[in-house]
Image (cartoon, coloured by chain):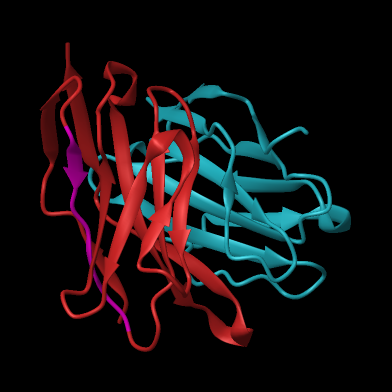
Chain colours: A cyan, B red
Amino acid sequence: GAGVSQSPSNKVTEKGKDVELRCDPISGHTALYWYRQSLGQGLEFLIYFQGNSAPDKSGLPSDRFSAERTGGSVSTLTIQRTQQEDSAVYLCASAGQGADTQYFGPGTRLTVL
Amino acid sequence: AQSVAQPEDQVNVAEGNPLTVKCTYSVSGNPYLFWYVQYPNRGLQFLLKYITGDNLVKGSYGFEAEFNKSQTSFHLKKPSALVSDSALYFCAVRASLTGGYNKLIFGAGTRLAVHP
């Protein structure tokens, strides 16, 4: 079956621009996570969605970062006024209801010039 | 607070030899432990997990991991390494979020290089 998909695979933007990253979780998975992978910080948790519950935003690094999940499926991570330190690979993962294992997408490589 | 340590940045192994990638953890309560592998320009692929039960966990691609509670370790092993095993390996532990949900905390990663 189809895994987690993310788009775009690569995004180059200029400092100060806004970007949107998309994640399509595995069909039927209720949990959706965003992580960021960067050279200096390793893999860090950003935000978590579970069904229609309010998301856990405890990992978002600043108020320039936001995410939404429409209809309990597709999620969009938005970074406003991008900075060079936002350059990283943004990974999305999903998990089934009550499941422990998260399945990851291929990631979006964001480069802020 | 939960944490994971991978003490080796890189592990070099000759093809056909056994390999070990080390991981130690710090959690309160029972640990839920995971190994993921990342190939170049790819996302993370799930290898195996320990939740409860047998201390030796078998996973994908011939990998296994041994849970050792007294040493708080969860080392990844394979009896005979392949060149195609060369990749970045991450150990992770489940950590709690509010509302009874959870996230993964990852180690820094270990790069495995298998030489022909």
Seen in the image, is A74 located left or right of residue A79?
right
Residue B113 is situated, as x and y percent measured from the top left of the image, at 18, 25
Secondary structure mostly seen in the magenta stretch? strand
Question: Which residue is depicted at the point 19% across and 37% down?
Answer: B19
Residue B13 is situated, as x and y percent measured from the top left of the image, at 12, 27
Q: Name the residue furthest top.
A: B116
Give the position of the N terminus of chain B as an image quadrant: bottom left
Q: Nearer the viewer, residue A32 or A12?
A: A32
Quarter of the image for residue B99 reads: bottom right
Give the position of the C terminus of chain B as an image quadrant: top left
Seen in the image, is A107 located left or right of residue B55?
right
Q: Name the residue furthest right.
A: A71
Q: Which residues are magenta?
A: B18-27
Residue B82 is situated, as x and y percent measured from the top left of the image, at 28, 21
Query: In the image, is residue A85 above or below residue A13?
Result: below
Question: Which residue is depicted at the point 10% across and 29% down?
Answer: B12
Query: In the image, is residue B84 above or below residue A73?
Result: above
Residue A59 is situated, as x and y percent measured from the top left of the image, at 46, 66
Q: Nearer the viewer, residue B75 or A55?
A: B75
Is residue A101 visible in the rendered image? The answer is yes
Seen in the image, is A21 located left or right of residue A83?
right
Is residue A86 visible in the rendered image? The answer is no
Residue B113 in magenta stretch: no
Question: Which residue is depicted at the point 82% across and 70% down?
Answer: A52
